[in-house]
């Protein structure tokens, strides 16, 4: 981060007050969980960040997001060209750096994406 946490303004030169460059990205951890005993049979989660779909695995993963603007994060389940379990959230630069996706009990229902407790 730039200098101290209390510094919010960046000079016009693009450097922080301590001479470092402010970060342009931040890392967000997303915990992808499926329900126990739910009929998923090969459904895999896919995360969409700024329009770019990224197939992923169940469990915890880390993604880079822009640090200077709001970013929409979407998650859905995919198998054989069929999508289900959709959920989305818009993260502001000041929001928490951890999210949790809970898959629905049945694939045709919506999932839940929220800040991690």
Image (cartoon, helix red, strand yellow):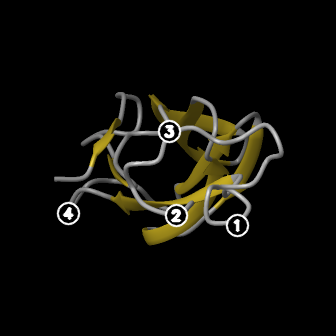
Disc number placed over residue 3 in the picture, else none = 2
- 2 vs 4, front mark: 2
How many numbered marks, from 0 up? 4
Disc number placed over residue 20 in the picture, else none = 1
First in sequence: mark 1 vs mark 2: 2
Check the image and report above or below for 116 versus 21.
Answer: above
Q: Which residue is mark 4?
A: 36
**Residue 115 found in image quarter:** top left
Badge 2: residue crowd in 10 Å (few <14, some 14–19, many ≥20): some
Q: Quadrant of the N terminus?
A: bottom right
Check the image and report above or below for 20 versus 35.
Answer: below
Tell whether label 2 touches label 1 (CB within 8 Å): yes
First in sequence: mark 3 vs mark 2: 2
Q: Position of residue 82 (x, y in %)?
A: 64, 36
First in sequence: mark 3 vs mark 1: 1
Residue toward you, 22 or 38? 22
First in sequence: mark 4 vs mark 3: 4
- Name the element at disc 1: loop
- Name the element at disc 3: loop
Badge 3: residue crowd in 10 Å (few <14, some 14–19, many ≥20): some
Residue toward you, 42 or 62? 62
**Residue 98 found in image quarter:** bottom left
> What residue do we see at 35% from left, 28% from top?
109
**Measured Cα–Cα span from mark 4 to mark 3:** 33 Å
**Measured Cα–Cα span from mark 3 to mark 1:** 19 Å
Direction from residue 36 to residue 47 in the image, left or right: right
**Measured Cα–Cα span from mark 4 to mark 1:** 47 Å
Q: Which residue is mark 3?
A: 93
């Amino acid at each position: 981060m730039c200098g101290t946490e209390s510094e919010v303004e960046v000079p016009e030169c693009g450097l922080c007050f301590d001479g470092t460059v402010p970060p342009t990205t931040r890392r967000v951890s997303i915990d992808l969980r499926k329900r126990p005993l739910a009929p998923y049979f090969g459904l895999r989660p896919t995360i969409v960040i700024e329009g770019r779909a990224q197939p992923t695995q169940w469990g915890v993963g880390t993604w880079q997001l822009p640090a200077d603007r709001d970013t929409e994060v979407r998650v859905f389940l995919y198998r054989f060209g069929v999508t289900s379990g959709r959920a989305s959230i818009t993260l502001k630069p000041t929001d928490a750096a951890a999210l949790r996706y809970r898959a629905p009990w049945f694939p045709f229902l919506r999932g839940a994406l929220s800040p991690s407790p």
